[in-house]
Amino acid sequence: MSCPYALAEMLRQLYSAGQAKAADVLLARCSLDGLQRLLDESSAFLGARVRYAVVEHLRHRKPLLEETALSTMRAIASVLNAWLHDGRRLAIRAVLREFSGEELRELAALPELNDEVATMTGDFS
């Protein structure tokens, strides 16, 4: 799989858990390019709610947000860390399952990623 699939799964998990505000923060942290890739690469995987949220976010995105946007990988890492503290390990595993082996190594190497989450990446590579 790939990073856009992981982002789509993360958004699906957030909306399923009733965490629309957290999903909005995640969308704001992602780069314009990352969100466009999400729509282009994984449109079949996206549910109607997630697709609608991404399209609306892109439509209303302020240009200033692009200056502070993170890579998709870093944006995902911040949510994974939060989920770990909330005890949502199954949600973490569902997202990690969507990454390719190379992307998992890249994610695990991020200095801001919690060590426990980095260790979990080894289960999927």
Image (spheres, rainbow, N blue to C red):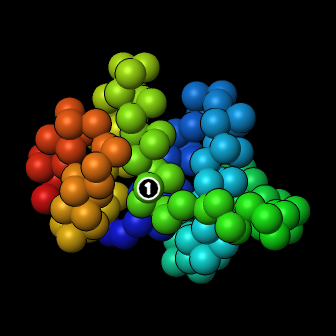
Q: Can residue 15 be seen in this snapshot?
A: no
Whether 78 is drawn above or below 39: the answer is: above
Near mark 1 (Cα within 10 A), the count class, few <14, some 14-19 or many ≥20, is: some
Q: Is mark 1 on a helix, strand or loop?
A: helix
- Residue at 20 percent of width and 33 percent of height: 116
- Residue at 45 percent of width and 51 percent of height: 76
Task: Classify residue 37 as left or right of residue 56.
Answer: left
In percent of width and height, residue 12 lies at 56, 45
In percent of width and height, residue 35 lies at 62, 68
Residue 28 lies in quadrant: bottom right
Whether 92 is drawn above or below 106: the answer is: above
Quarter of the figure that contains the N terminus: bottom left
In percent of width and height, residue 107 lies at 29, 57
- Residue at 57 percent of width and 37 percent of height: 14
Residue 112 lies in quadrant: top left
Residue 61 lies in quadrant: bottom right
Whether 25 is drawn above or below 34: the answer is: above
Q: Can residue 108 be seen in this snapshot?
A: yes
Whether 125 is drawn above or below 66: the answer is: above
In percent of width and height, residue 92 lies at 35, 38
- Residue at 28 percent of width and 36 percent of height: 114
Quarter of the figure that contains the C terminus: bottom left
Residue in front for this viewpoint, 74 or 21: 74
Task: Classify residue 52 as left or right of residue 8.
Answer: right
Residue in front for this viewpoint, 68 or 48: 68
Q: What residue type is labelled 1?
A: Arg
Residue in front for this viewpoint, 69 or 46: 69
Residue of label 1: 74
Task: Classify residue 8 as left or right of residue 77.
Answer: right
